Amino acid sequence: MIRNLALAAGLAVLWLLLSGHYDPLFLGLGMASVALTFFIASRMRVVDQEGAPHTLIIRAAIYLPWLMWEVIKSNVDVARRILTPSLPIAPRTFTIRASQTTAVGRVLYANSITLTPGTVTIDVRQNEFEIHALTSESAEEVRAGRMDRRVTQVEGAG
């Protein structure tokens, strides 16, 4: 029941934010759109923990600013290496084990690695990720596991 309410509320808020129209006609069309989408999702039985992860919202709100800071730091590092040719670039690939237990957690971790400039998740096999790193420092940052631990906390397992 809570998942259904969270999905309906999330769809309504998303529609309001993306439409920007608050006339009665548009609000009515938006409500109809939300109701139809909710009906289809319910009939498809996709309103589950992974389809509507309402419990992740607060933890994700804490994680996202940290991730954005990591993205900014990595952007600066990559830009410095491009603008200063004397700084070393040592591309490498390596495999790490992820501690996430759900598909949502693994996807969040793989995408977080890829969003951070200088690192890309190349392949995912269950809990093993193949990573490409531009420098040895960025490789060590991933191997250190800080991001892994934070994503596990968002997931709710840590």
Image (cartoon, rainbow, N blue to C red):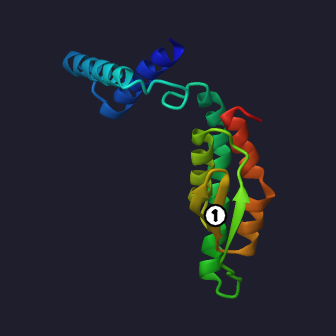
> Crowding near pointer 1: few (<14 within 10 Å), some, many (20+)?
some
Relative height, residue 72 to residue 134 (above, below): above
- Amino acid type at mark 1: Glu
Relative horizontal placement of residue 66, taking residue 10 as reference (left or right):
right
Residue 89 position within the rendered picture, expressed as x and y whole percent measured from the top left: 67, 81
User: 59 or 72, which is in the foreground?
Assistant: 59
Quarter of the C terminus within the rendering? top right
Please identify the quarter of the rendering in which residue 144 is found.
bottom right
Residue 146 position within the rendered picture, expressed as x and y whole percent measured from the top left: 77, 51
Residue drawn at (63%, 49%) of the image: 109
Q: Residue furthest bottom?
A: 86
Please identify the quarter of the rendering in which residue 155 is found.
top right
Relative horizontal placement of residue 12, taking residue 69 as reference (left or right):
left
Q: Residue furthest top?
A: 1
Q: Residue furthest front?
A: 126
Relative height, residue 57 to residue 133 (above, below): above
Residue 73 position within the rendered picture, expressed as x and y whole percent measured from the top left: 67, 60
User: 108 or 69, which is in the foreground?
Assistant: 108
Relative horizontal placement of residue 158, taking residue 105 as reference (left or right):
right
Is label 1 in a helix, a strand or a loop? strand
Residue 51 position within the rendered picture, expressed as x and y whole percent measured from the top left: 48, 30
Please identify the quarter of the rendering in which residue 133 is found.
bottom right
User: 18 or 112, which is in the foreground?
Assistant: 112
Residue drawn at (56%, 52%) of the image: 111
| Tag 1 residue | 130
